[in-house]
Amino acid sequence: MRKLLLAGALLAVMGPVALVRAGEAIRPEKTIVLFDGKDLGAFYSYLEHSKYKDPKKVFSVQDGLLRISGEEWGGIATREAYRDYHLVVEWKWGEENHAPRANKARDSGILIHGRGPDGAAGNKWLESIEYQVIEGGTGDFILVAGEHRPSMTVECREDADGALYWKEGGKPVRRDSGRFNWYGRDPNWKDVKGFRGKNDVTKPAGEWNVSEVICDGDTITAMVNGVVVNKGTEVAHPEGKIQIQSESAEIFIRRVELRPLAGSR
């Protein structure tokens, strides 16, 4: 009993990060439903200012949907770590956009292979690799540093301004910071609410999109509405938590599930 009491006290001090230890990542053998339209039991919240509390109800379940208001920056992270999976997230933008991005492109993100202490990146997010969800840039990879610098290699084409875009068969580039753009990102992208690029495969605000992230060993493949838009290899983080961001924009989510990789048992 004394050990249980001590463990409970430790969890109260350290927060949910204590629930996941190295080497315990789960490899799905069947579909794992992380959000069932009823509750957020698979997740815990962490916000820049209120930490493990959510007094503003940034994260709530309404009419079978997860609503993320964006009012405070942070995210909801899975209580468990995962590896070798096919993640499916079905989402759409809401109308609200809060300061400091009130008039800027709607912005969120899905953080993959999160590790280390909560808030390690900017006092908001886990150290991780981000599948960016932003108007005009959904499917970009961003390397989110914490105590360490996550790294990956992407085959790229380089624009005149030095920006890198995924191109299968292109020059392999390895980075431990910065961004790898999805292949069709508009070079004239503007950080304004409602932006749409000429090659965007996301649907307009208010319509449902399907984001998929396939994590297979040290390879991450990003898809948007059935189209492969980015791919990274030699990923330094092969496992970790999954965190969905709150980053000023209102976003609704109706499905979050992990599927086994094709051909796995």
Image (cartoon, rainbow, N blue to C red):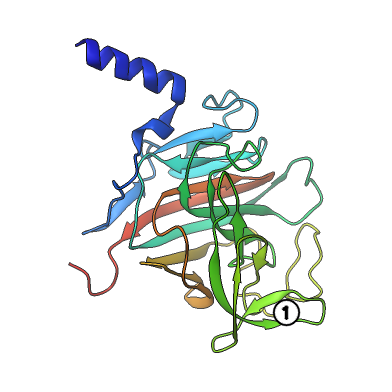
Q: Quarter of the image containing the C terminus? A: bottom left
In this view, 160 is above or below 56: below
Residue at image mark 1:
198
Q: Nearer the viewer, residue 93 or 231?
A: 231
With respect to residue 146, does 91 lie above or below?
Answer: below
Quadrant for residue 6, please give it: top left
For residue 177, side relative to residue 192 (left or right): left
Q: Residue 69 appears at what percent x and percent y?
A: 62, 40
In the displayed structure image, the side of residue 19 where residue 125 appears, left or right: right
Q: 72 or 177, which lies in front? A: 177
Instruction: Give percent across and percent down for residue 28.
Output: 26, 57
Left or right: 124 as drawn, with respect to 83: right
- Judged from this view, the residue extending furthest toward the bottom is 169
Residue 202 visible to an observer of this rendering: no
Q: Classify mark 1: helix, strand or loop.
A: loop
Residue at coordinates 35% horizontally, 46% vertically from top-left?
36
> Which amino acid, mark 1?
Lys
In the image, what residue occupies the spot 45% across and 51% down? 254
x, y (%) of residue 51? Answer: 57, 27
Identify the residue shown where x is 30% and y is 48%: 23
